[in-house]
Amino acid sequence: MKQGNKSWLASLGRVISGLRKQSMDADQVDPSDPAITKMTISLALDLLNEEQSHERFKPKDRVSWKWGMKNKSVPLARQTAVALQVRQEPFNDSTLAPSSTYYEEPLDVLVGVYTHEGIFRELWVDGRRLCLLTDHRINSPNGGTQWGQGEG
């Protein structure tokens, strides 16, 4: 697939600046902070205790990542995606190696989203990591900012 140099360079710039911001944010977080431990436990419990996706979502629902649950490059944090299909029984991507962070991840919601390149993309995600746009869990628990620094 060929892209013009301008759009390719713009995409590369966004990736590099995003990685830089990620590493700067990580430097600001003290892993021994009791608030971080509390937040980790809270996110894990939310992931484990979530209702089945087919009970919470239906096709055409507008969804986004829950705060702290984003594990794929798209949709972006707080970006609106559309649930296209919801499976009652999750499946696992058999093409992934055991060393992949997505190995054995239960995939049960097909979402559609426009990427920043203007391409409509569909991908299967773990529905426990998603919430409706009206859900309060879309925002960070400390008032909309991540770790009290900048935008989350």
Image: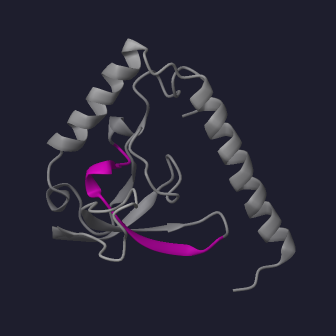
Q: How many marks?
A: 0
Would residue 126 be found to the left or right of residue 31 on screen?
Answer: left
User: Residue 15 appears at what percent x and percent y?
Assistant: 69, 55
- What residue is rendered at 26% in x and 36% in y? 44
Nearest the viewer among 135 and 20 is 20
Q: Is residue 64 magenta?
A: no
Q: Quadrant where the N terminus lies?
A: bottom right
Considering depth in this image, is 60 or 38 the residue closer to the camera?
38
The quadrant in which residue 111 appears is: bottom left
Left or right of 94, for residue 71? right
Q: Is residue 122 magenta?
A: yes
Left or right: where 141 falls relative to 25: left
View extreme (bottom): residue = 1
Task: Report which quarter residue 67 is drawn in.
Answer: top left
Q: Note whether 146 is above or below 59 in the view shown.
A: above
Residue 51 in the image: state x and y as whole percent: 14, 49
Residue 20 lies left or right of residue 102; in this view the side is right
Query: On screen, 37 above or below 136?
Result: above
Question: Which stretch is magenta?
Answer: 118-134
Outermost residue on the top side: it is 34
Q: In the image shown, does 60 or 48 lie closer to the viewer?
A: 48
x 67%, y 38%: residue = 21
Across and down, in percent, residue 80 comes to 47, 56
